[in-house]
Every structure is written in structure tokens, then in C-alpha cells.
Image (cartoon, rainbow, N blue to C red):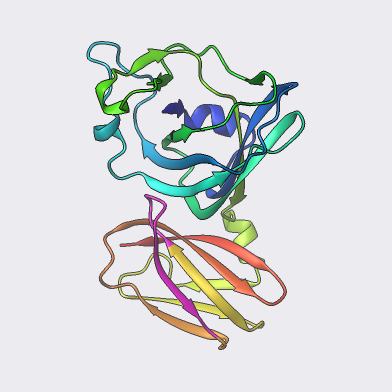
Amino acid sequence: MSLYTAQEITAAGGMAGIISSLAWSKSGTGEYTFNDAYIKVLLKPTTTSVWPTSPVPDWNTEIVGATQVFTSSTYSIPTGTGWKQVPFTTPFPWNGTSNIVIFVEWSRPSTPTADITWGRSTNANTNATRVGSTSLDALVMLVNGNRPLVQLTITGAMSTDEAANATFKLYPNPTNDFLYIASEKSITKYVIYNGNGEAIKEENSPINLQEINVSKLSSGIYFIKIFSEENTEVLKWIKK
């Protein structure tokens, strides 16, 4: 499990929005194309910026509340070198201020054709891992700075000026009970995500003005991804 701070992400050009994929930097001459590897990727917002070394973090504790964004039991690593993307099946909303921890479960029954190397940083105590052929529950986490380099694909939530010129309009925002979507274009679908990256409401809608009852949601920041036949937009809204 690897920590990435909000400061790092924004310094690289990231902004609040929906994370739809990540990529790792692959080098070496080896390939793994056997369609038999197991991989699971989860993301979670956190206030932690470095892992403690005494006591070391516990995987089963830290993973509570994480959002599974991708999994496969028939995975092959994309061929060639460079950034290799993992598209998420569940997008992850990021508020632009929280740090992010990326959890990866990985195992492979076959052997790569040659060495495969992954790009890594040297940020102290930002990576925690346990590797072995026995039960992972029997292994202690190793904290180090050997953190994988990642690229995140983020569809940014619009700024106030951008939202004013957006295809879709939200009102009132902030809101207590109902959120409305207005558009001259026909809305085909919307998905609401909470701050933990969970899709909490989804609906297909052929109408131009959609009333959404949000009265039972907790106060906080949410994202809504709105679809039409022509385009897709991500907007941020606040529940009072």
C-alpha cells in the first residue's frame, strides 16, 4: 500500500475530480501475457502522509473503507515499456485535498519471459508491503521508500467559472433536500459519488430537468457525473 499526498498530485497538475485510471511505469525486456494473474486495486482518501515504522501499519486495518476500483483473475500485463494503464471499473472521486493510499493485491502462477522493472520513487516511509509465498496474514508489513511511480487520469470537477458555462447546471448548490439538473440537452444518465469514491446513486433519465432527492445523504462534498448523447461532465456539489 502506497501513499501519495495531495501536494504531490496537485503539483503534477491534478485537480479535484474523478480518477478513472492509473498507470505504472514499466521497463525491462520481460512480458507477462498468460491471462492468469490476479490483481485487485483499491483507493482510499487519508490524512496520513507517511507510514509509521513502530508499530508498522496493519493491512486489514488500513484497507477498511477503501474502494475497489479494479480486479481481475485473468490479468496480463500490457506489453512493451512505458506507462501501462489500468482502467478503473469503478471511478474514484478525489476532493483535491486528501492524500490517497493505493492498495494493490497481486499474485501470478506463471513466470515472466524476462525481467520486468517498475519505476519507483525514494520517498521515505511512503510504501508498505508484504511479499511471500506463504499466507500474507502471517507476514509483517515492511515500510520503505520503494513506492511505485503512478500516473492518475483525473476528470476534473469544474471550477465556478467553468460550471457557469457547462452544458449541465446544478441548483441549488449547496442543497438540503433536492438537487436539480438542468440542461438543453437530454440527460441519459447520472451517477453520484460520495467522498469515499462509492457510487451511491445512479439513474437513467431521458428528461431535461431531473429532481434528485438527496435529503437522506450526510453533509459533505459529493461529485455527480452527468451523461448525454453528446458529452459527459463532472460537477461538484455540497450537501448541507
**Residue 61 placement (x, y as % from top left):** 24, 33
User: Which is nearer the eye, 96 or 174?
Assistant: 96
Q: Give the side of residue 143 with respect to residue 37, left or right.
A: left
Which residue is found at the position 74% from the left and 35% from the top?
79
Q: Give the side of residue 53 with respect to residue 98, left or right.
A: left
- Residue lying at the far bottom of the rendered structure: 207
Residue 44 in view, yes or no? yes
**Residue 17 placement (x, y as % from top left):** 54, 50
Residue 16 in view, yes or no? no
**Residue 56 placement (x, y as % from top left):** 27, 17
- Range of residues picked out in magenta: 193-205
Residue 84 colored magenta? no
Give the quadrant of residue 167: bottom right
**Residue 130 placement (x, y as % from top left):** 37, 21
Q: Quadrant of the N terminus?
A: top left
The number of numbered discs placed on residues in the rendered structure image is: 0
Q: Give the side of residue 149 with respect to residue 202, left or right.
A: right
Which residue is found at the position 44% from the left and 65% from the top?
192
Q: Give the side of residue 165 with respect to residue 121, left or right.
A: right
Give the quadrant of residue 63: top left
- Relative vertical location of residue 118 with respect to residue 195 in this rendering, above or below: above
- Relative vertical location of residue 30 with respect to residue 62 in this rendering, above or below: above
Which residue is found at the position 66% from the left and 82% from the top?
185
Residue 199 colored magenta? yes
Which residue is found at the position 39% from the left and 48% from the top?
67
